[in-house]
Amino acid sequence: MLSSGKTFKIFLVMLLFASSSLTVTPRLQMAQGLPDQTALPTYWPSVYFCNGTAFSYDETFTGGVGDTITIALVAFNLTDNKVDDPGGEGSCPLGNLEGFDVQISWNPTVLQYVSHTVTVPVEDYPSPIPPSPYAGILHEEAFELVNKVNETDAIPNAEPGTMAWFAYSIMPGAAVFNGNGTFFTMTFNVISRGSSPLKLTNLNLSGEGAESRKVKFLHKFDGVFRTVDAPTADFTFWPNIGVENKSVIFNASASYSPDKNLSISKYIWDFDDGTNATVNDPIISHSYVRRAEAYAVSLVVEDSNGTRSSPETQYVSVVKKRNVKINDVSLMPAAKVLANRTVDVKILLENDGGAEYENCTVRAYYNATAVNWTDISTTDWIKIGEVNVSIKGQPAPEHLTWNTTGVPLVDAYYYVLANATLVPYEDPKDNNKTSRDPILVTSTQLRDVAVEDLECGWSDAFEFPVLNGEKTTFQITVKNEGTENETSVNVTLYNGSSLLTSWNQTIPYGQTVKLKHVRSFDVGAYNITGRATIGGDVDPDNDIKRKTLQVIRTPKLNFTYDPKTPYVNQTVSFNASASYHGEPGVNIIEYKWYLLDPRGTSRPHSNGPDLINITNQFREEGEWRMVLSVTDSYHITYSAHRTATLAYQIGVTIDVQAPPRFPIDYIILLVVVVIIVVAVLAVIIYRRRRLKT
């Protein structure tokens, strides 16, 4: 018989445990085990039906009709570690077990309950009870909250379908449990041929030492029992990732009956979207009308004797579309190559569908005949090579090497065609692409350098025009488009006829160099020329590029306001008509007004092309700041990272004062004067009336 003190302790523990973990209505977030997984994960705890093997699980228990079997439910890898709760409820324990709430179900037409043993506490069950490899669970002093088994009627307050419910907790002050342990063992008689799920209908673990006491991160594995002669369900499906409103083909031909005299007569499908089907053919197709990360597709087969298998479940992802496309094909070197040398073929691929990864084969070809651009399939293409790729979301380059030995013609131009094999249900229009330009395969050594680009402007961004006082950055891009390495390329940069700078460069064939120069210029327009020269250049027309550099003046900003000392809620007029742009022919196209209140908080006021004049009422006293920022017809405006644009902004501090108060002395004097005037008037009126009488 329990003492009153211990009874009260148990009552308190029951309240605490019920509030932290023994709530059967909400479901915990659990990581489900993959269907083909056999080794237990070690980064979170696992709860599974054990068939006698430590550190792994076997989801199938077997036996024959008339046999007696015993199962064990165990916990693996309970630790003192904690993780952040994604729901924002603090940290969650991965162990420190204080109690558990376990509910299970089975098929009572196949398995008939005989007995069970809850192995709590571990001090009473220090040795494993087969088939578990682990001792008991929870430490002394532990007590029972729920211990019920009922195969025929619903257990009150349990999850639907529950046939056994076990819940235990420790007393305050008892040691928490970590490691591996056994919740219970349960014995059944096998009473008929067939299969039975061993299902965890509910699982809650309570862990001490974190803000959220639930052990939320768990791998939960259901188990299966089947008689040795029961049929087995198995299936494959195509494609591996489905597409909305497109057929997924399920093939259950791998399902079988161990009894050679029996065959599979029914295939019972649950597609996890509200659709079920019972068919006689092992192959069936199904379309999903909306995308989802995973549909749990389940198959049960029935043999010709009417015995059913346990469910086989596999997960099918469905996306809105699947597509692999080729964005670009480029060649290095790009223009010319000596016969028998190699060309690098760079193919830019993209997976722009909904699948996380797409697998395909990328092949490259060069044309053996003139390209028919109307229908490139009529052109004779010779294969260069292929590569198998797995593409994630962003465009990614793949490279193939083309050895030009053996091309049909030397001193001829060739294009390269890239092809990506189709993924299921994709649009094939973007799976082929040719190189933008042909490459000349020649037998003659050719020397050719080209200026590909000439840029100038403020900073490495080459912002144009340059503002007065800023330095100008020049960049000239030179490419060796010949067939030989060049060891002495003369690169020059001129302002009109004046040399700004020069370089002597080594540029391997097919390679590019970028050269920079920085210099200050006064306001004005400058004709800039970039040139690259070598002896014997076969194409001197591409050796030069020209650019115009413009350096401009900045705006001259000014605005006035009236009154100069405004009061709270008084209308203040601002006038920026005295502002103008310092560069002839350049206009201010937009005025933006900003307010900074006395606390320094920015309050955009208004902006527009015609807002030269505005009004404002200040709602509180203190030092306000009105800022005017303008944009010119080059679309240059103030930017914190560009110092010279400070001229595009001006600000004024305005001292806003409280409305003046009428002095109390004047009020008193006014009252006295009014009283005297009234008194005098009263005397005059009185005397006039006396005179009349």
Image (cartoon, rainbow, N blue to C red):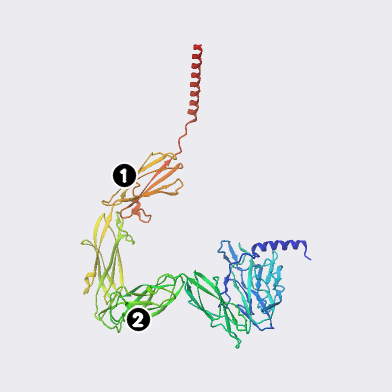
Which residue is label 2 attached to?
Answer: 384
Give the x, y percent position of residue 470: 31, 56
Q: Quadrant of residue 434?
A: bottom left
Q: At x 49% / y 28%, what residue is drawn?
A: 667
Quarter placement of the N terminus: bottom right
Q: Quadrant of residue 323?
A: bottom left
Q: Nearer the viewer, mark 2 or mark 1?
A: 2
Q: Residue furthest bottom?
A: 260
Relative height, residue 608 to residue 201 (above, below): above
Answer whether residue 684 is visible to the viewer in this image: yes
Give the x, y percent position of residue 173: 69, 64
Which dot marks residue 578?
1
Q: Which is more toward the observer, 43 or 165?
A: 165
Whichever of labels 2 and 1 marks the residue nearer the N terminus, that label is 2
- State the SS at label 2: strand
Give the x, y percent position of residue 32: 57, 72
**Residue contact between numbered discs 2 and 1, judged by CB atoms under 8 Å:** no
